[in-house]
Image (tube, rainbow, N blue to C red):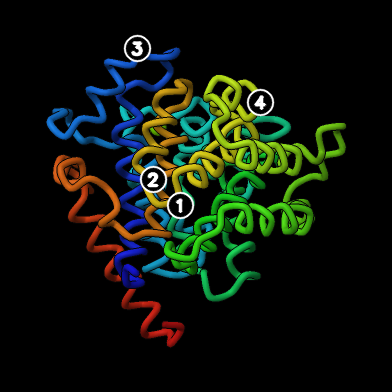
Amino acid sequence: MATFLEKLKGGVIGAFLGDALGKEVEGRKRLPEESIKEIESPGYVWDGDYTDDTEMMISIMEALLEREFDPELLAQKFVENYHSYRGYGRGAKKVIRLLKEGHSWSEVAKLSFPGGSFGNGAAMRIAPIGLFYFYDENLLIKNAILSSIITHYHPLGVEGGVLMAYAISMALKKDPRTFLPIDFLDVLIEKEADIREEVYKYTYRYEGEDKEIYLYALKKAKGFLLENGVNLSRVKRQLGTSSKAHRSVVTAIYLFLKHFDTPFEGMMDAIRMGGDTDTIACMVGAIGGALNGMGVFPTEKIDRLTDEGKGKSYVLSLSEKLYKRLKDKGVL
Ligand SMILES: [Mg+2]
């Protein structure tokens, strides 16, 4: 089995790779299979650059290293690292603007979006929280929520982030040689209500008839896994591929479970399905990398990830520092 450090690197580099590859086709409807094959092929040439998903993930890593875990500092990092050309959503752009104007981290989500955003922006960036707080479930859930509510006030947006962090953390602790996808999903199904209750302590209580929307989706994913060989258009229809958290987080969890020992294939399925491809492929990569380690991804793809800006080398150096921090804390 990969070492802990390789798994930690796998989680963040998997997210980076999914983001960088998925952005190539973001927002497109289904692509012809030959275009998919081209992206999949070892010789595929692209810029290897990342989008808002990775940029915000880097902010979380920096904030964890500087002063774990302080949402005010994280909000400041979001502002410092922000590049508008990296494909931020409208809500995130507004949050950044409000922060720059001096509003507090705790009020910008509400100010930017009355009722709160249920986009997948909290989940797309959350890998470092899942990887770092693997040793304490309460801390993991609490800090996953704190990292989410800076931009997301709607409970569905926050719960998507926490479920993703929880899944990444579980994957990190598992051995791929004895991994059982259904058992993994059963834990999430069992935990969902507790996670939702925790989320409600920081957001408003969502009383719509879709209150159990994540629970339904997780059970649907379990049905798909048991059925074996469900086609992607059905998955897309029922679990979703949009930028809404509740229409993409469970999709990513399902694609990971379907390809748990070959997560690159899960990423390619995310790309094949269209929609919010960068974020869904990013989330598949984060969980798959945390389970298997960075070595599970094709070397030629990792080699092409950009080193410009806060690129691959920088992200890897932050991973090593986080690893060292965990050692110093005595949890490894
Ligand atoms: Mg993006």
**Residue denoted by label 3:** 32
Q: Is the C-beta separation of discs 1 and 2 under 8 Å?
A: yes
Residue with the mark numbered 2: 263
Residue pointed to by mark 4: 238
**Foreground of the two, 128 or 215:** 215
What residue type is disc 3 on? Pro
Q: Is residue 182 left or right of residue 50?
A: right
Image coords of residue 95 (percent x, y): 52, 36
**Which comes sooner in the sequence, label 4 or label 3?**
3
Image-quarter location of ligand 1: top left
Label located before the other in sequence (3 or 2) = 3
Contact between labelled residues 3 and 4, with CB atoms less than 8 Å apart: no
Q: Does the residue labelled 3 lie within 8 Å of ligand 1?
A: no
Do tag 1 and tag 3 residues touch (Cβ < 8 Å)?
Answer: no
Q: In the image, what residue type sits under mark 2?
A: Pro
Characterize the local packing of mark 3: few (<14), some (14-19) or many (20 or more) Cα atoms within 10 angstroms: few
Name the residue at 34% across, 41% down.
264
Quarter of the image that includes the N terminus: bottom left
The alpha-carbon separation of the residues under discs 1 and 4 comes to: 21 Å
What kind of residue is marked 1? Answer: Ile
Please give the name of the residue rendered at 62% of the width and 21% of the height, measured from the top-left corner: 237
What secondary structure is marked by label 1? helix
| Up/down of 314 relative to 215, above or below | below
Q: Which quadrant: the C terminus? A: bottom left
Q: Where is residue 200 in the image (x, y as percent from the top left)?
A: 78, 51
Asked whether the residues under the numbered discs 3 and 2 touch, taking CB atoms below 8 Å apart as contact, a structural biologist would say no
Residue that mark 1 sits on: 287
As rendered, which of 128 and 21 lies closer to the eye? 21
**Secondary element at image label 4:** helix
Task: Specify few, some or many for label 2: CA neighbours under 10 Å numbering under 14, 14-19, or 20 or more.
Answer: many
What is the CA distance from the residue labelled 4 to the residue labelled 2? 21 Å
Note whether 271 is above or below 5 in the view shown: above
